[in-house]
Image: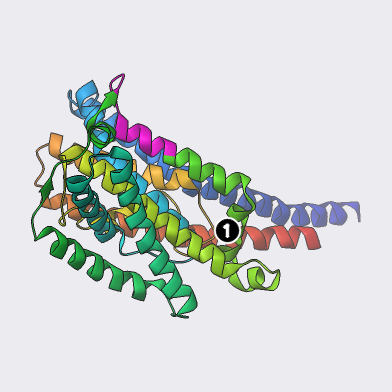
Amino acid sequence: MKTNLACSHDKASVPGGNEAAGHHLIGLALAGLRFGPGFILAALVLTLGLSSPYFFTARNLGNVLAQTATIAVLAMGQHLVILTRGIDLSVGSVLALSSVAGALVYREVHSSAVVIASMLGTGLAAGFINGFVYVWGRLPHPFIVTLATLSIARGLALELAGGAAIPGMPATILFLGGGSIGGVPTSALVAGGVALVLAGMARWLVWGRWIYSVGGNPDAARRVGIPMRGVLLSVYMICGITAGIGAVLTSGRTAAGSPLFGNLAELDSIAAVIIGGASFLGGRGHIGNALTGALMIGVIRNALNLLNVDIFFQLIAIGIIIVLAVEADVLRGRLEERFRMIQSLRVNQ
């Protein structure tokens, strides 16, 4: 009798052990997916440092940071939009329009503050239009209005600039976009400052929690009284401001405003957010995701240049990485669902 009881006890303990092991493995897999982009970036940097003697030179690292700064700033604004299950396809064109607006203002007023204000104001206005039309126009998805703004802003930039770049930018903008402090590009410091501000707003303000609520569960957010219209409008306005900041950095590097700036920058910003580990499903991720993704894009492009790989393969490489990142997001969703199921079963037992 005792033998039978012991056998039955052993049989009962096996599933529990398997369940605990499965629970542990799923937890490790989720952690791997969550921190995977950071690990991949570190491994990529290490591999490139061993493959090319030029990668870890101060000049090359400075170039990577400078070239990545604009993408990073755009990606941070895009990240807030994606957190709410939205998307902004107009950031590249708004960047171009903002740079042209700044160059035109500089022709009349040689004031750095006024020129910067005109760039940021142009981006803010475009973001407001995107958010207002999407929210109060009751459009089914922001894809529609931001696609329209992409075309309108690019057309306005081309018309205002006469289809050509407008030379000339004040010294402050040249310093912000092309200067350095202690060997660190000023543009990278600007991107870091934007990251600190947005991360602080998302973490310490009630507004930040509202963003995650709107993106994570819109119906629940509406029921508890979160001002969804205001939240959605605010993220598109901030995305517009980041496009204006991107215009300041780009114009500072080139000493001009051009209607051709920001070509395909909207795709780079979206790719950076997704590659960095955020989700198109909304409500998940942080500013670090955008920065990680932007750095990965910058490092990959720099690596292909150092290794003398055809420039057209850059587009192929980024496209493949985007597909892998989206698949990783799908896998993470399934693992999280399985993880919650196991937890609920353990609680009910």
Q: Is residue 324 above or below residue 253?
A: below
Instruction: Give the labeled residue for mark 1.
Output: 212
For the N terminus, the image quarter is bottom right
Question: Residue 164: x and y, percent?
Answer: 8, 55
Q: Which residues are magenta?
A: 181-193
Q: Is residue 188 located in the magenta-colored stretch of the structure?
A: yes
The tally of labels here is 1
Q: Residue furthest front?
A: 108
Q: Residue furthest top?
A: 182
Q: Is residue 127 above or below residue 75?
A: below
For the C terminus, the image quarter is bottom right
Observer-nearest residue: 269 or 330?
A: 269
Residue at (62% x, 44% y) in the render: 204
Q: Is residue 306 above or below residue 37?
A: above
Question: Residue 246: x and y, percent?
Answer: 30, 47
Question: Residue 327: x and y, percent?
Answer: 39, 60
Q: Amino acid at mark 1?
A: Tyr
Task: Examine the residues drawn in magenta and state their main secondary structure.
Answer: helix
Q: Give the secondary structure at mark 1.
A: helix
Q: Is residue 277 at all visible to an observer of this figure? A: yes
Residue at (30% x, 63% y) in the render: 90
Question: Residue 335: x and y, percent?
Answer: 55, 58
Tell me which corner region of the image, top left, top right, bottom left or bottom right, holds residue 250: top left
Residue at (18% x, 27% y) in the render: 52
Observer-nearest residue: 76 or 326?
A: 76
